[in-house]
Image (cartoon, rainbow, N blue to C red):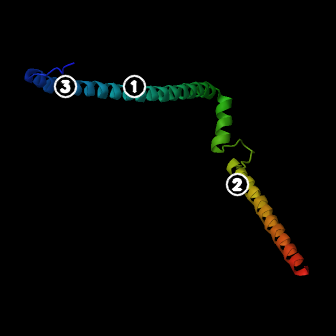
Amino acid sequence: MAKKKIGKKSKRRLAIFAPLSLLIIISFVFTFISYTLNITRLAKEEKELKEKLATLEVEEKDLNIEINKLKDPEYIAKYAREKYYYSKDGEYVIKYSEKDEEKKDNNEKKDYTNYIIGFGIFALLTIFIFILRRKKDK
């Protein structure tokens, strides 16, 4: 079988069309990748916005309920007493904060952890001393 010779015209055409077709293929791939990334970014953004919309709708329902409650004069009086420490004649206002209770609870937990750590150190020292005495006796 004889080798087929490629002419000068064919070489020129190949030299012109090969880089051109390669450039077109690269641009298609680049465009495809950029559109795919853009679609995924937009899908993620859509999901976040839907979640935000759901929370805002719940908040709107809560606010509408609160508006309806504020139309009741008894609720307004109770709300003012709780929130702004207003009192009726002959009543005394005593402030009570849940934050203070949380701080007390946290302090109690820290105290227990300190006791546990102290007991652990004491136990380790006792075991260490016991082992040293046994070595001296041998």
Q: Name the mark nearer the viewer: 2 or 3.
A: 3
Seen in the image, is 115 located left or right of residue 62?
right
Q: Name the mark nearer the viewer: 3 or 1.
A: 3
Residue 125, position as x, y percentages in the image: 81, 72
Residue shown at 55%/29% (left/top)?
A: 55
The answer to which of marks 2 and 1 sits earlier in the sequence is: 1
- On residue 128, the disc is none
Where residue 35 sits, quadrant-wise, is top left
Q: Which residue is under mark 3?
A: 18
Seen in the image, is 134 located left or right of residue 111?
right
Residue sitting at the far right: 137
Seen in the image, is 25 located left or right of residue 113?
left
Residue 23, position as x, y percentages in the image: 22, 27
Where residue 61 sits, quadrant-wise, is top right
Q: Is residue 32 above or below residue 103?
A: above
The answer to which of marks 2 and 3 sits earlier in the sequence is: 3
Q: Which residue is under mark 2?
A: 103
Name which residue type carries label 1: Ile
Name which residue type carries label 3: Ala
